[in-house]
């Protein structure tokens, strides 16, 4: 048999390797996606449905509950009454140039204080306080405002407490009106309120300066019993 009549052996079948398999899989998946969103055979693609975003639901913020009546900010006092209160507070505290905003707050809170039998308005009318010529301490003492266990004394103590501490009563709680301008700090010459800088660094480490004690003249000193003075020649 000649070589021309010999049958040609068939080529052995080869399996797909991993790379070829992944490539063919990607082609199938991509073809399916293109067929789903591609053009139709007539050249016209499927009409896309109009898309409208869902409007966001904005819920209204819950309204806070109304504050109790005893903690609500009272209305601003009358300017004339405030001037009287500041004049009386100057006499009681011993300090001038009091903060009018703090005075208005203290006056309003004291006027609505539930445990005070005597209100500031009643006391100011009773004393007929003139802002241009406030009463002296002697006059207040004669009027009996400093007598203990009286409604007037309770009011006076509250006025001094508010001014010196910067803390006032708001219902059953206490609120801080000021720290820096509390008169307790103004009455201390050797220190200052927090956050207030001193005149120079490390001023707080210096010994407080006190006024010299006045010397007592010999004639004013009492003599001891049984002692006698003798003149010497």
Image (tube, grey):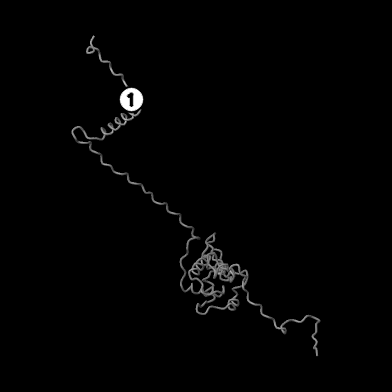
How far from the left and from the top, in percent, is residue 164? Answer: 56, 68
- Left or right of 183, for residue 20: left
Q: In what quadrant of the picture does the N terminus appear?
A: top left
- Of the pair 115 and 55, the residue shown nearer to us: 55
Q: What element carries label 1?
A: loop
Q: Position of residue 173 (x, y in %)?
A: 54, 59
Image position of 211 (left or right of 36): right
- Residue at 31% from the left image edge and 44% from the top image edge: 53
How many marks the image carries: the answer is 1
Is residue 1 left or right of 110 when viewed as pictured?
A: left
- Residue 145, image x, y percentages: 59, 73
Residue wearing tag 1: 16
Residue 33, picture quadrant: top left
Residue at the extreme top of the image, as rendered: 1
**Figure check: 62 above or below 99:** above
Q: Can residue 117 be seen in this view?
A: no
**Residue 60 at least partly seen:** yes
The residue at the far front in this view is 2
Please name whichever residue, 145 or 27, is drawn nearer the observer in this view of the structure: 27
Image-quadrant location for residue 156: bottom right
Residue drawn at x 80%, y 82% as measured from the top left: 227
Callout 1 crowding tier (Cα within 10 Å): few <14, some 14–19, many ≥20: few
Q: In which quarter of the image is the C terminus?
A: bottom right
Name the residue furthest left.
Answer: 42
Q: In this view, does 51 lie above or below 32?
A: below
Where 9 sits versus 205, above or below? above
Q: Give x and y (percent) for residue 202.
A: 57, 67
């Amino acid at each position: 048999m000649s070589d021309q009549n010999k049958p040609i052996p068939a080529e052995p079948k080869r399996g797909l390797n991993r790379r070829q398999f992944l490539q063919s899989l990607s082609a199938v998946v991509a073809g399916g996606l293109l067929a789903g969103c591609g053009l139709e055979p007539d050249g016209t693609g499927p009409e896309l449905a109009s898309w409208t975003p869902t409007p966001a639901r904005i819920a209204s913020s819950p309204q806070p509950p109304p504050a109790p009546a005893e903690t609500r900010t009272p209305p601003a006092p009358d300017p004339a009454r405030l001037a009287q209160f500041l004049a009386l507070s100057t006499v009681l505290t011993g300090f001038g140039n009091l903060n009018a905003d703090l005075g208005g707050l203290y006056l309003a809170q004291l006027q609505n204080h539930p445990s005070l039998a005597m209100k500031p308005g009643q006391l100011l009318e009773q004393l007929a306080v003139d802002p241009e010529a406030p009463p002296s301490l002697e006059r207040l003492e004669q009027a009996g405002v400093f007598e203990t266990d009286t409604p007037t004394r309770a009011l006076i103590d509250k006025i001094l407490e508010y001014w010196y501490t910067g803390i006032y009563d708001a219902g059953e709680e206490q609120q801080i009106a000021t720290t820096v301008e509390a008169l307790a700090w103004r009455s201390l010459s050797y220190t200052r309120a927090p956050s207030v800088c001193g005149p120079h660094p490390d001023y707080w480490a210096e010994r407080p300066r006190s006024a010299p004690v006045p010397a007592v003249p010999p004639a004013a000193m009492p003599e001891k019993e049984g002692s006698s003075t003798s003149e010497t020649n």
